[in-house]
Image (spheres, rainbow, N blue to C red):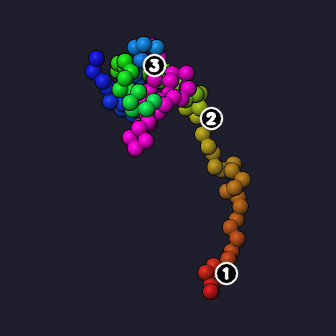
Amino acid sequence: MAKLFPGIGKWYQDTVSLQLFEVVAVDEDIGAIEVQYLDGDIGEFELEVWGQMNLVSAAAPEDANAGYGASYSDPWEDNPSYINDSSNNPVESIEPESFLGYDDIL
């Protein structure tokens, strides 16, 4: 089986444990690969361990953002009533203080 180089944003499946995960970070300086499993758990492998694993490339699952707590059917994206309306924002009514002088006088 050919060994796969970990690509950020790529999905892999361990053929032994059948776990599906996405590579979210690769730090070659310390030799670590950070992954996120489909259920949201975070894991880390050393580069040496990665090379010994039986991995295959996998397609991203249908709801690949489930581990992040987000979903494409998010009601915040589809409902225009949640759009920020700055006309009702009380911060907009605050007038700035006038300042006469200089901050950096020695």
Which image quadrant is residue 8 in? top left
x 41%, y 38%: residue: 31
Q: Nearer the viewer, mark 1 or mark 3?
A: 3
Q: Which residue is mark 3?
A: 20
**Which label sits in the foreground, 2 or 3?**
3
User: Which secondary structure dominates the residues rendered in magenta?
Assistant: strand
Quadrant for the N terminus, please.
top left
Residue annotated with mark 2: 81
Mark 2 vs 3: CB contact within 8 A: no
Q: Report helix, strand or loop for mark 2.
A: helix
Which quadrant, please, contains the C terminus? bottom right
Residue displayed at 63% across by 45% down: 85
Q: Where residue 9 sits: x, y (%)?
A: 40, 31
Tag 1: amino acid: Leu
Q: Nearer the viewer, residue 16 or 102?
A: 16
Q: Position of residue 96 (x, y in %)?
A: 68, 67
Look at the image and say whether residue 54 sits in the magenta stretch. Answer: no
* Residue interval drawn in magenta: 18-44
Is 98 left, or right, of 2 in this rendering? right
